[in-house]
Image (cartoon, rainbow, N blue to C red):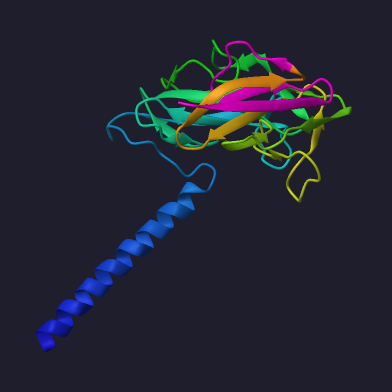
Amino acid sequence: MSSFKSSLKAVFLTLFFALFTTFIACEDGDRTGSGVTSGDPGLPIYTVTYEIDGVKYDKNTSHAKITGKTVQEGASVKADDKVFEGTEIVFTAIPNDGYECDYTTWTGATSSTGRKTDPVTANSDITIGIDTIQLSSTMYNVIFNQPANGKLSASTPAGTPVVSGTPEEGELSEVNDGTTVTFKASPNDGYKVQSWTVAGTVQTGETDEKLEVVVTADVTVAVTFVEE
């Protein structure tokens, strides 16, 4: 019996330690500047810094944020994280609601697509920056209905849900002039996107499940599904 109790105690302590370690890892993953990407321990380690409008990123005051993802592992790279020499990182700029990023102002990186940079290789400390533009205070309605045989949702670049009708807390039904709204179609099983319609005009060749619309007036968006 004594041997059984000792074994049970050992199992309990092992499980407790594993859960505690997981908890600490998750907590660290949520903190800015806590991460170090995996790599050869013998390699130099460099710090990644983000700047918005020429000032070091501050989640409370900056008008956008930059996120990074390693090419090798797809690991997230937050502000002030550290990476091993040779790590390749792709950075993405995400403007706050009411702002847009000026994708011609990337510093510390080049960009072929605008919102995302080309891969940057860590050979020294890295500082990545971008400028923002405040959008017009003019607001426009975004209107859409739920389609047959699927669902339709929308969001701003900051990830704020956009709804048609009366918004609840944390949602928008109108957006600033110039805001890029991303619409996401979710067809039921056995269906696919047949077409998108924006402001009464069918968008020729657009059959992807996502559509970006730059809102410059009240706009109505619709998606049609067809059987596969």
Number of numbered tags placed on the structure image: 0
Q: Quadrant of the N terminus?
A: bottom left
Residue drawn at x 57%, y 11% as measured from the top left: 205
Please report the bounds of the magenta region as a residue range: 201-228
Residue drawn at x 77%, y 40% as measured from the top left: 172
Q: Work out whether residue 107 or residue 218 is closer to the camera in this orientation and state it.
A: 218
Whether residue 130 is visible to the viewer of this picture, yes or no, is no
Quadrant for residue 129, please give it: top right
Q: Residue furthest right?
A: 138
Whether residue 16 is visible to the viewer of this picture, yes or no, is yes
Q: Residue furthest front?
A: 227
Judge left or right: residue 228 versus residue 13.
right
Image position, residue 225 (x, y; %): 57, 28
Residue 35 higher or lower than 54, as above or below = below
**Is residue 205 rendered magenta in the image?**
yes
Image position, residue 26 (x, y; %): 44, 53
Judge left or right: residue 167 versus residue 157.
right
Q: Work out whether residue 7 or residue 98 is closer to the camera in this orientation and state it.
A: 98
Residue 46 higher or lower than 167, as above or below = above
Quadrant for residue 62, please give it: top right
Q: Residue furthest bottom?
A: 1
Q: Work out whether residue 177 or residue 98 is closer to the camera in this orientation and state it.
A: 177
Residue 121 higher or lower than 55, as above or below = above
Quadrant for residue 113, please give it: top right
Judge left or right: residue 10 versus residue 43.
left
Q: Quadrant of the C terminus?
A: top left
**Is residue 27 rendered magenta in the image?**
no
Judge left or right: residue 114 versus residue 88.
right
Image position, residue 99 (x, y; %): 76, 28
Image position, residue 84 (x, y; %): 37, 30
Q: Work out whether residue 218 or residue 83 is closer to the camera in this orientation and state it.
A: 218
